[in-house]
């Protein structure tokens, strides 16, 4: 910046504006609540550009939560169950949340307790990699449970 080589000093507003005009830069108020108010001579457009750039960089570094979904039936076999558990463990290792649901078709709705047992077994199988964020809950024809990755 141009103002780096100039030592800080107290001057009146007219002098500061004249100095900024001579340098073809802007006089920007940095701290209005200070006594006296603090101003800086800089290129305002460049300042705004750098602020937007910093915000964009911070936004890109923020973690994005992804929810992966795994669907089971109330009568899922052991092999299929283990296969889906392995998928869920992979998702949890990657830092994603996993939504596991048991879908009841037609008359299988009478096996609600079997679906809940299946979901609790699923949570127990994934306990090393993730913990249940929401316990099994029946919503219409689906019983849903959400697992979130455990902290490393």
Image (cartoon, rainbow, N blue to C red):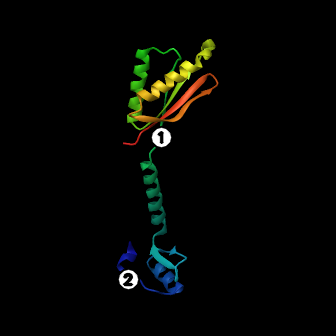
Pick whichever, 8 or 83, lies toward us. 83
Res 23 → quadrant: bottom left
Identify residue for label 1: 65
Question: Which numbered mark, 2 or 1, is in the foreground of this view?
Answer: 1
Task: Give percent across and percent down for residue 56.
Answer: 46, 53
Pick whichever, 131 or 95, lies toward us. 131
Do the residues bearing badges 2 and 1 touch, measured as CB atoms within 8 Å?
no
**Left or right, residue 93 beside residue 15:** left
Instruction: Report the residue that reaches farthest toward the left.
Output: 5
Residue located at (59% from left, 24% from top):
142
Identify residue for label 2: 7
Task: Give percent across and percent down for residue 144.
Answer: 56, 28
Q: Quadrant of the N terminus?
A: bottom left
Task: Give percent across and percent down for residue 127.
Answer: 41, 32
Q: Quadrant of the C terminus?
A: top left
* Secondary structure of residue under mark 2: loop
Pick whichever, 88 or 57, lies toward us. 88
């Amino acid at each position: 910046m141009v103002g780096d080589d100039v030592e800080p000093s107290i001057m009146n507003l007219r002098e500061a504006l004249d100095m900024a005009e001579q340098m073809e830069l802007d006089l920007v108020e940095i701290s209005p609540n200070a006594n006296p108010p603090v101003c800086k001579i800089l290129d305002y457009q460049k300042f705004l550009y750098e602020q937007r750039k910093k915000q964009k960089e911070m936004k890109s570094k923020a973690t994005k939560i992804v929810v992966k979904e795994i669907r089971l039936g109330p009568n899922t076999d052991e092999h299929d169950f283990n296969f889906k558990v392995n998928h869920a463990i992979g998702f949890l290792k990657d830092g994603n949340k996993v939504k596991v649901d048991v879908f009841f078709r037609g008359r299988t709705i009478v096996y609600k307790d079997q679906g809940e047992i299946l979901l609790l077994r699923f949570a127990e199988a994934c306990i090393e990699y993730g913990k249940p964020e929401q316990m099994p809950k029946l919503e219409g024809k689906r019983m849903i449970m959400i697992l979130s990755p455990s902290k490393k």
